[in-house]
Amino acid sequence: MIYEGKAISVKALESGIVELRFDLKGESVNKFNRLTLEELREAIAAIKADASVQGVIVSSGKDVFIVGADITEFVENFKLPEAELVAGNLLANRIFSDFEDLEVPTVAAINGIALGGGLEMCLAADYRIMSSEAKVGLPEVKLGIYPGFGGTVRLPRIIGADNAIEWIASGKENGADDALKVGAVDAVVAPDKLEAAALDLVKRAISGEFDYKAKRQPKLAKLKLNAIEQMMAFETAKGFVAGQAGPNYPAPVEAIKTIQKAASFGREKALEIEAAGFAKMAKTSAAQSLIGLFLNDQELKRKARGYDKVARDVSQAAVLGAGIMGGGIAYQSALKGTPILMKDINEKGIEQGLAEASKLLGARVEKGRLTPAKMAEALNDIRPTLSYGDFGHVDIVVEAVVENPKVKQAVLAEVEAQVKDDTILASNTSTISINLLAQALKRPENFVGMHFFNPVHMMPLVEVIRGEKSSEVAVATTVAYARKMGKNPIVVNDCPGFLVNRVLFPYFGGFARLVSAGVDFVRIDKVMEKFGWPMGPAYLMDVVGIDTGHHGRDVMAEGFPDRMKDERRSAIDALYEANRLGQKNGKGFYAYETDKRGKPKKVADPAALDVLKPVIYEQREVSDEDIVNWMMIPLCLETVRCLEDGIVETAAEADMGLVYGIGFPPFRGGALRYIDSLGVAEFVALADRYAELGPLYQPTPKLREMARTGQTFFGQAANVQNKGE
């Protein structure tokens, strides 16, 4: 053994060939943490000191190669002053360059996922052989940063600027065939042939059959593009990527600028340019928020996996109520491998549910994401029925009938009599109390809420609602089923609206106040979309359905009358009474036409303004900043209340619920991280400026105490001002 550590070992294989093996002890994956980087430096030094070494193979002792940097550790570095961050980055890069400069040929044998720093390690090798089942990529832009271990320098010089820009700016994972096609790897082999192929390649390089020094040289030199080619490649790319990413996600465009600046320099100067840009990105609020979301997502998944110990297996599911929602749930279950019965009381509902599932599966086939055979298999796993005949074998039933407590109670009591004693019943309700619905059941311990968001196939969140009598087994089994369906479940406690809708309706309340103060709803939509929401509140209400919003508003007003009840008629009342229900009947705040792809397209409709005139009670001068604050303060404060009331257990889950459930702008990180980014004391002072607007704008005593004592929801790292955003 030439070198042995806790993350890396170097051992002789044969004829002067050594294997540098990544195998981080105590972890299921390899990642670049401080330990691994330090051991890599030591391992390279040991190889350099051993004159018998003629070639190096880099391998992994795990199913993956290297998944990237340990972001939980490296995020601490982002708090350092920018100059220190640059210096630290260059020290790390020296390790990769030292590996690249070894006097012997090097081959990376990529057996599994190699992302971020994992791929950058491979790029520092002379040759790369990839398993046909592996994936490679540089996903750093998804965290608001870009590659910092030489990825913006080496990749363009290996695969060309155009291909490198596409890989880095998109952050996508690439399969073996795509990697081979652009020249990111030199060969692709079956997984069981990888070791032998790597050994053969390094031997041929040692013998001189392959000139490894010539292969290495382009990575040390300038990018081979003349001035005109550079201008065409980079300026076109910057314009296109800026349009795709938008102004709130600077990392993709900054990555292109870095490649462009470094194009005229050799490796050492190019790496300095990368390090400076990387440090600049690490200091942005977008990076703080996106990294925070990544860490929150990891915590969410960890908590969800924790239920596996208690969960029972779901091998057969059922959904009550077909239609669009039931069809969407059936599609998702069958697509991910759990057969499902789809019951309705009439043939029309069944037809609608099957049509929805068929449409969604067909769309996947058209995009090449599903084979026709797999589509047929999924459709066969959806069994329509008008009776309870086969319900005796079902492990979980998702009730998805109309949002009416009496109807739901009747249906739940009816199905409870038809299933096994341990079958889990789950209500797909968006607002109705789980404790109230449980009153109709003989076995309330088997009952939970399972709130899917519409459209089911697109929205990643599922709220699993724990009632007072819900058992841990019922909660755990529902969480496990949601995960099996490819969803991100968050367990919340029962209250009107649960987490997401309880927080959303105060946001809509702020919108209603603005409209009643004479502010044009089209202007409000534009301001909130500029703030970062995927759609403005008027457009969102049209998509959700004015009738759905009207019902939800009434439920919330009854549940929280002190702050959510408004005696005056509002915009939603006026539209509801005029039967302007949004996209579902072609007119709401906007009117809707069908575009070329058959999708609804919003257009201005002067008739809506006439409908709204009676609910405009004053004409106030309101700035764009006021519009943001009128809407965001109630949403943020209600999120705080949900955390304080124990509806949601952690700040991470609260924020992820809003990002996954209602499209809260990811670059702002969620409501609680948004408060942190402004500063808790500053946010409280901001809310007090709008106190005249009512109880929705009143900070809680606990939040005031947090402001007084300097506490934050996510620690000091979140205290970054949203400058220029």
Image (tube, rainbow, N blue to C red):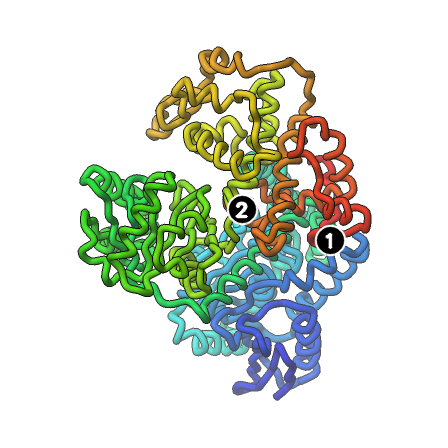
The N terminus lies in which quarter of the figure?
bottom right
User: In the rendered image, which residue does mark 1 sit on?
Assistant: 717
Q: Earlier in the sequence, mark 1 or mark 2?
A: 2
Q: Residue at x 55, y 31 (%)?
A: 508
The residue labelled by disc 2 is 499
Q: What is the x, y in percent for residue 712?
A: 73, 51
Q: Judging from the image, what secondary structure is the residue with disc 1 in?
A: helix
Residue 27 visible to an observer of this rendering: yes
Q: Amino acid at mark 1?
A: Ala
* Viewer-proximal residue among 618 and 215: 618
> Where is residue 516 shown, x and y percent of the image?
59, 19
Instruction: Identify residue type, mark 2.
Output: Leu
Q: Nearer the viewer, mark 1 or mark 2?
A: 2
The residue lying at 44 percent from left, 49 percent from top is 434
Using a 10 Å C-alpha cutoff, classify the residue at mark 2 as few (fewer than 14 neighbours), some (14 to 19) or many (20 or more). Answer: many
Question: Which disc is residue 34 wearing?
Answer: none
**Where's residue 244, x and y in %?**
54, 37
Going 32% across and 62% down the picture, which residue do you hit? 423
> As rendered, which of 174 and 199 lies closer to the eye?
174
Q: Residues within 10 Å of mark 1 (few under 14, many from 20)?
A: some
For the question of whether residue 188 can be seen, the reply is: no
Q: Nearer the viewer, residue 135 or 697?
A: 697
Looking at the image, residue 539 lies above or below residue 489: above
Quick one: SS at disc 2? loop
| C-alpha distance separating marks 1 and 2 | 25 Å
Residue 574 in the image: above or below residue 79:
above
